[in-house]
Image (cartoon, grey):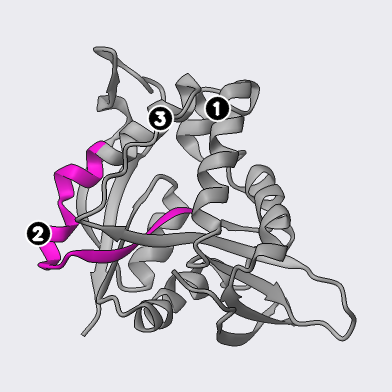
Amino acid sequence: MLLKKLNLRSFEEVRNGVPLKFKIQTITPDLIEDVLRHMFTYFLTRKPITTYDDLLQDGKSVSSYTRFWKKTLLSGESMVALEQRDDDIVKIVGVNITTVADKHKNYNEVYEGKVFNNVLNDVKNLTEIGNVYKTYDLDRYLTSHGLSVHSDYHGYNIGLRLLETREVLCQELGLKATATVFSSKVAQYLAAKAGFRTLVEQSFRTIKVDGKIAYPDADGSLKLMGIKYV
């Protein structure tokens, strides 16, 4: 657990001739509520398997995502991209909710909400199949529960820079690898561009819940993708 803010990297990107300066740092407690609003606005409304089942219409699932994310954010191991401005306004342009996965810890907290639990189980099942601990021969690695970029800032490579900055965060945390289940084609493309390789993949149309195909009309797949740093 990180107990202090870490300034990880700074960037200047240009889109259509318009520059943007932003920094990536760890998420501190004062930013948590703003980060949660960002994730509900720009992540859950785009994630294929949450939009398929209208997660935002399921009150219990919304409450569970809030509790799940908040618990993760309080560890201080997640990242936020903030626009670097000349005033005191805090502008979140991207978020990656990252945390340490530990082979020796039990993750058995119970959550409510059918849609939330379906999503959580989909990710857990693919992660178990990929067996990151065995694949990379380690006991701990950096995982993630959401990568999102503010819609007004697409085209500034913010998602890519957050993925690349995981290496810096891993160094700070004493970790040698990162791995995540990505559900969107954009995130999968950016992860591959950042050096991640696919460990295991499952088509949405083969995922079952209670013995039935859960996403029969969904296009795409879940991919467990990872990278081990040298």
The magenta stretch is 125-147
* Within-10-Å neighbours for mark 2: few <14, some 14–19, many 20+: few
Comparing labels 3 and 2, the label whose residue is closer to the camera: 3
Front one among 229 and 215: 229
Element type where label 2 sits in the image: helix
Q: Position of residue 24 (x, y in %)?
A: 59, 78
Rendered position, 161 above or below 116: below
Element at badge 3?
A: loop
Q: CA distance from mark 3 to mark 2?
A: 26 Å
What label sits on residue 81 in the rendered view? Answer: none
Q: Amino acid at mark 1?
A: Ser
Where is residue 141? Give x, y as percent: 28, 66
Indicate which disc, 3 or 1, sits on the residue closer to the N terminus: 1
Q: Gap between marks 1 and 2, in whole Å?
A: 32 Å
Residue density around tag 3, few if under 14, some if 14–19, many if 20 or more, within 10 Å: few
* Mark 1 touches mark 2? (CB < 8 Å): no
How crowded pointer 1 is (Cα within 10 Å; few <14, some 14-19, many 20+) is rated as many
User: Which numbered disc, 1 or 2, marks the residue that appears first in the sequence?
Assistant: 1
Residue at 45% across / 29% down in the picture? 111
Q: Which residue is mark 1?
A: 61
Q: Which residue is mark 3?
A: 110
Q: Position of residue 131 (x, y in %)?
A: 15, 51
Depicted 3 relative to depicted 116: above or below: below
> Where is mark 2, residue-wise?
134
Is 53 magenta? The answer is no
Q: Is residue 120 above or below residue 97?
A: above
Name the residue rendered at 42%, 83% in the picture.
Answer: 168
